[in-house]
């Protein structure tokens, strides 16, 4: 066994494991979001997590749960799309194709989905507060927006991953170009 095959063997095992973990994560995110809006206490927990104490005062009627589901649909879709992309990246790595333009593309898509979570966080909190308060039968209306360190962190991590993916894409393109000369 050469020195180079050992790290790639480890990468292959890790990539296969992460592909499974990502697949499970996709299923859990989707199932969790559906359950979140079917179970009122889970909807309340989501409101508390996204809006803090403001979310505690909002009514959890069936209309409010439906409105909350609509408000979080876009960020969840973006997240799941990114998870599908990173799962495809892990699949490429497991097949020994880690240094390819295709792998770089999957990483760029994932990075973009992570970075998009930064503006979607405050937007979602605003939509949640308005949507749920619109469903309030008492007529009280509320608009709240929250900013989190997690939103900033998502932007930085997404940007760093996108930069790394861009470097990987260029390196893979140059490697392909050089292989054609030989």
Image (spheres, grey):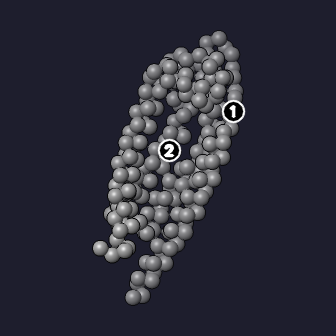
From this view, report whether residue 85 is shown above or below residue 26: below
Circle 1 Cα neighbour tier, 10 Å, few/some/many (<14 / 14–19 / ≥20): some
Circle 2 Cα neighbour tier, 10 Å, few/some/many (<14 / 14–19 / ≥20): many
Residue occupying image coordinates x 66% and y 32%: 126
Residue occupying image coordinates x 60% and y 48%: 154
Task: Give the quarter of the image for residue 45.
Answer: top right
What is the number of the mark on residue 79?
2
Residue occupying image coordinates x 38% and y 46%: 21
Residue 46: horizontal and vertical position, in percent? 55, 28
Residue 137: horizontal and vertical position, in percent? 61, 12
In terms of depth relative to the viewer, which is nearer, 20 or 55? 20
Label 1 SS: loop
Q: Earlier in the sequence, mark 1 or mark 2?
A: 2
From this view, report whether residue 153 is shown above or below residue 124: below
Residue marked by disc 1: 145
From this view, report whether residue 30 is shown above or below residue 170: above
In the displayed structure, does residue 98 sit left or right of residue 168?
left
Q: CA distance from mark 1 to mark 2?
A: 20 Å
Position of the N terminus by quadrant: bottom left
Q: Is residue 59 visible?
A: yes
Residue occupying image coordinates x 58% and y 45%: 117
In the displayed structure, does residue 101 sit left or right of residue 123?
left
Task: Give the quarter of the image for residue 93.
Answer: bottom left
Label 2 SS: helix
In terms of depth relative to the viewer, which is nearer, 141 or 146? 146
């Amino acid at each position: 066994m050469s020195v180079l095959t050992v790290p790639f063997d480890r990468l292959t095992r890790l990539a296969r494991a992460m592909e499974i973990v990502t697949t499970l994560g996709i299923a859990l995110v989707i199932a969790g979001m559906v359950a979140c809006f079917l179970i009122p206490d889970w909807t309340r927990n989501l409101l508390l997590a996204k809006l803090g104490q403001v979310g505690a005062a909002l009514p959890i009627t069936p209309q409010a749960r439906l409105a909350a589901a609509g408000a979080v649909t876009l960020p969840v879709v973006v997240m799941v799309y990114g998870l599908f992309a990173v799962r495809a990246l892990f699949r490429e790595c497991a097949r020994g194709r880690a240094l390819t333009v295709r792998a770089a593309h999957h990483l760029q898509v994932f990075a973009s989905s992570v970075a998009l979570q930064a503006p979607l966080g405050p937007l979602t909190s605003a939509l949640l507060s308005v949507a749920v308060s619109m469903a309030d039968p008492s007529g009280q209306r509320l608009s709240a927006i929250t900013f989190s360190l997690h939103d900033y962190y998502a932007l930085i991590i997404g940007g760093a991953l996108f930069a790394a993916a861009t470097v990987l894409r260029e390196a893979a393109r140059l490697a392909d170009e050089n292989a054609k000369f030989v």
